[in-house]
Image (cartoon, rainbow, N blue to C red):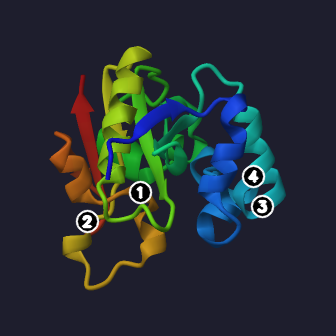
Amino acid sequence: MPDPVVLPLTAERWDDAVAVFGTRGDPARCWCQWFRMRGAGWKGARTASNRAALQVQTDDDPPPGLLAYVDGEPAGWVAVAPRTGYERLRHSPKVVRTVGEVLDDGSIWAVTCFVVRTGFRRRGLAGALLDAAVAFAREHGARVVEGYPVDVASRTSVSSSELFHGSLTLFTGAGFAEVARHGAAGPVVRLAL
């Protein structure tokens, strides 16, 4: 696979995001909003409102994430933003109890979601997206990047839909270190910049 080109999701690239998120499965329902809501807000969310929310977020500075292109074709997505923008993380026992620091620190960024289109999987695209997400966070003043991957080695089976967090080996391969664990398969990883 040729090296992907990874660019911020801006309003001008919205149609490319639509191609990556597709029309079926979890990405097409969530539109990367699960970490941005919690409780009743998420339970009341619908596909159309999630899609509209991500489209509005393309005007944010910085944008809500990055798109990967392979030979000019939209192929993948990674959500990366200051942790303060993710309501679910700000109230998560997994983060609050295990990280043990101020949750309103805007210099801590989080990588929360990956989407790789069928046809581009198992070709290293998630790794390229993670590397680009770290570089993007650094360029925007992050001092730390966090992730909440799945430790597939600690489970007998993991569905593909659960891997939207990324795998532990993906993050450790990019230099992240495990700093806490919530349950057998729920590590929190960090990379100091």
Side of 190 where 47 appears, left or right: right
Which tag, 2 or 4, sits closer to the chain's start? 4
Query: Is residue 40 shown to the viewer in this render?
Result: yes
Q: Badge 4 local density, few (<14 within 10 Å), some, or many (20+)?
A: some
Q: The disc labelled 4 sits on which kind of residue?
A: Asn
Residue at the disc numbered 2: 151
Residue at the disc numbered 4: 50
Tag 1 and tag 4, C-beta contact below 8 Å? no
Secondary structure found at label 1: helix
Q: The disc labelled 2 sits on which kind of residue?
A: Asp
Q: How many marks?
A: 4
Side of 40 where 148 appears, left or right: left
Q: The disc labelled 1 sits on which kind of residue?
A: His
| Label 3 to label 2: alpha-carbon separation | 28 Å
| Label 2 to label 4: alpha-carbon separation | 28 Å
| Residue 47 image label | 3
Secondary structure found at label 2: loop
Tag 4 and tag 3, C-beta contact below 8 Å? yes
